[in-house]
Amino acid sequence: MHIRGDHAELAVGGRLDVRSAADARTALHTALDHGRGDLVLDLTGLDSWDATGLGVIMGAHRRAGRTGRRLVLRGVPPQMQRLLVATRLHRILAIEGGLEAESLPRV
């Protein structure tokens, strides 16, 4: 996994899983604690995530709310969109452009 960006936008690539969770959490918390406004998390280059990676995203979402910011997901890959819809997290998370649940295949 690699994360690049600043306090307004981060791009995540590779795998967001149990092995990369601590580094991802640190990068997200640092960006949230030192920036203002929305933090855009670009997931276009993300290959996969597991439950731990999803937990990191949800933790960052909660932390953003506590700091008066909003975590916005951009470029969510289709397989991850299906997971967000199946878990109904697409109703909680801010997703740029939204997700069309009806057009996504069921998991």
Image (spheres, rainbow, N blue to C red):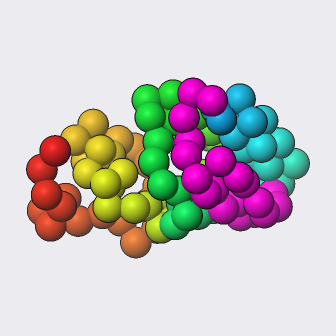
Judged from this view, the residue extending furthest toward the bottom is 97
Q: Is most of the magenta stretch helix, strand or loop?
A: strand
Residue 93 in the image, given as x and y percentages of width and height: 44, 48
Q: Say left or right for 36 vs 97.
A: right
Residue found 83% across the figure and 42% down from its top:
30
Residue 10 in the image, given as x and y percentages of width and height: 70, 60
Relative to 65, residue 98 above or below: below
Residue found 31% across the figure and 54% down from its top:
79
* Residue 4 is inside the magenta segment: yes
Q: Quadrant of residue 81?
A: bottom left
State the count of labels.
Answer: 0
Q: Is residue 41 visible?
A: no
In the image, the segment drawn in magenta is: 1-19
Q: Say left or right for 44 vs 37.
A: left
Q: Say left or right for 95 vs 16.
A: left
Q: Quadrant of the C terminus?
A: top left
* Residue 11 is inside the magenta segment: yes
Residue found 45% across the figure and 48% down from its top:
48
Residue found 63% across the figure and 56% down from its top:
12
Q: Say left or right for 32 vs 102.
A: right
Q: Nearer the viewer, residue 61 or 37?
A: 61
Judged from this view, the residue extending furthest toward the right is 34
Residue 38 in the image, given as x and y percentages of width and height: 66, 60
Q: Is residue 79 visible?
A: yes
